[in-house]
Amino acid sequence: MQTLKEPGLYRTQAFVDGRWLDADDHARLSVFNPATGALLGDVPAMGAAETARAVAAADSALSAWRSLLARDRSTILQRWFQLILAHTDDLARMMTLEQGKPLAEARGEVAYAASFVEWFAEEGKRLYGETIPTTGIDRRFMVIRQPVGVCAAITPWNFPAAMITRKVAPALAAGCTVVVKPAEQTPFTALALARLAEQAGFPPGVFNVVTGDPVAIGGVLTSSPVVRKLSFTGSTEVGRLLMAQCAPTIKKLSLELGGNAPFIVFDDADLDAAVAGAMVSKYRNAGQTCVCANRLLVQDSVYDAFAAKLAVAVEALTVGGGLEPGVTVGPLIDDEAVLKVEAHVADALAGGARVLTGGRRHGAGARFYVPTVLVDVTPTMRIAREETFGPVAPLFRFRTEEEAIRMANDTEYGLAAYFYARDVGRVFRVGEALDYGMVGINTGLISTEVAPFGGVKQSGLGREGSRHGIDEYLETKYLCLGGGSVMRHASALQPSAWVTRFASLIPEGGEVLDFACGSGRHTRWLASKGFRVEAVDRDAVALELLAGVPHVKTREADLEEGPWPFAGHHFDAIVVTNYLFRPRLGLLLQALNHGGVLIYETFMIGNERFGKPSNPDFLLRSHELFERVGDACTVLAYEQGEVTEPKSAVVQRICAVKGHHPSLRLP
């Protein structure tokens, strides 16, 4: 680490509440270079007590952080992004030393890690809510999205920078605070990112990193009711354990777990392109990626040709320490990883598979394995059922498209899948049939900050990256705004055109009986012009909107049945929706003064929306109405407020029947 351009990035203390701290008992955890076995340094071996204080610090910082404007959080994240890029060389070197990947790959990971910070710095400014059309005139519906709260992130060793930023950046952008527990093998990259976050200006307690005992730290993060969200990348076995530990506190979970990715090569594929894709997918990071091709399924007619081409490409790889020039494959992370690769290869050979190239340890060191291609592999072998996590490509033979899909889906995992084909129909058929969260088609490299990353089945829950990634750190809240105060502003709205039309026919200061008050907009307008309005409705909530309005008297009554409330009363105008009064037209007309105005809302005729039977001849058969109105009164028939030429056939028929009455006025 002495060769870093910025020595201050090499931190040997944990970062909690804006301070660099040792473990309470000063215990230390040693970190070794997987390529050489050399000691790189040590970090605090923290436990439950220190983790609990980190959670408390995050909780204390939450209120102020979530209250910041989104653009202010974005500004800090942008500074962090710039600092990460500015220190690419140091971060890449540190990553190669503690993780083993070639320096060129480490540089690529730094750029990939930074891309999540930049993406979510912008995405945090677009956390829009929504409004929902109301179901009642007295209320409004809104949906807002708020930060979930304190979040925990447990990250793996294979991508020690990117797996942190992919979790932390969306959490911070959303307004959450975080506690990160990095892998024991790769804590220095995490602590360097914390140092850059400190320089970027994150307030104390917003971003915390604890190192040490995974069982003790994980126990606090999963059991604490203060921690509202846990994000984990690692094995399915550990994911199951964490999920069970989170159950008592019902946390939100994002789990990116194991994989068993199929890489399918169909007979119409471009074989050279397929080989190039397989090299990227299978041998990147020495095969130690959760989305690397674990099973290469090749159609029978191109099997031998593809195998030969792949073997040539694999033999061109250079194995060695990640800092050595030209190295393309580094060491496996530890001795256990090497033993697993050897066990898978041995089991395959015992079952009849053949080594086309490789198949042994490399002379560069105990943790190096020669990139390998196996042929004649069958689905019964361990390498077909388990995730190898090493530089071994087993080739399986299939004959039909249906067989390939069945073999690909025959696993408990469902993270990533790949296939190469040129037939467009096949592309869509296979892409939709593969039971995986991500599918690469004619490419072996699918990871990007702009697309959702995650799996199905026992490969996990939730998504990281893209706009979907920030949703994992948000709660959706529904706001129902009720009460008259919501709608009382309706008085400021202009009335419908038909209201002003018939109002000119009513005597000044006249009395109006309003059976169609709706939101109260036109009722208020009539009252504001000096008319005395009696508003009637069976819904008390609707009448509440008119409570206290001058010149408006409200009455709650069922006007279709029950006692008639207006015996002996006479009005200068009556506003009515026709479907309410089919059985009580006589009573209605008795309440209308001689020479008064009857305004009839006709659009309900033949409308089943309110549960009333269609009856387009209703008005035409209402002889009592026509005899009573005659030349003495004025009738206005309108359709949903229209004041232009009448549109409904019913209104046109009324015109025809009443055309000899000069007093009839139809807008």
Image: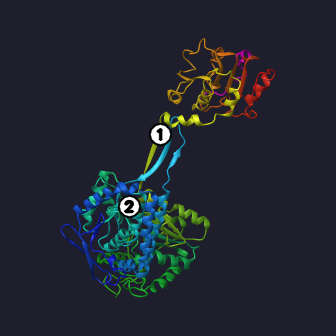
Q: Which residues are magenta?
A: 611-628
| Residue 554: image location, x then y, percent | 54, 23
| Residue 117: image location, x then y, percent | 44, 67
**Marks 2 and 1 close (CB-CB < 8 Å):** no
Q: Is residue 486 left or right of residue 43?
A: right
Quarter that holds the N terminus? bottom left
Specify the quadrant of the image occupied by residue 627. top right
Q: Is residue 384 above or below residue 513?
A: below
Which of label 2 and label 1 is nearer to you? Answer: 1
Specify the quadrant of the image occupied by residue 657. top right
Is residue 392 something one can see in this rendering? no
Which residue corresponds to the image point at 33% horizontal and 83% vertical from the top-left? 35
Dot 1 amino acid type: Leu
Q: Is residue 544 left or right of residue 354?
A: right
Magenta stretch: includes residue 531: no
In the rendered image, which residue does mark 2 sit on? 255
| Residue 544: image location, x then y, percent | 50, 29
State the residue in front, 506 or 624.
506
Looking at the image, tell me whether mark 2 or mark 1 is earlier in sequence order: 2
What is the basis of the colouring in this image? Answer: rainbow
Q: Is residue 221 above or below residue 419?
A: above
Magenta stretch: includes residue 613: yes
In the rendered image, which residue does mark 1 sit on? 481
Badge 1, how many Cα within 10 Å: few under 14, some, many 20+?
A: some
State the residue in front, 556 or 512.
512
Dot 2 amino acid type: Leu
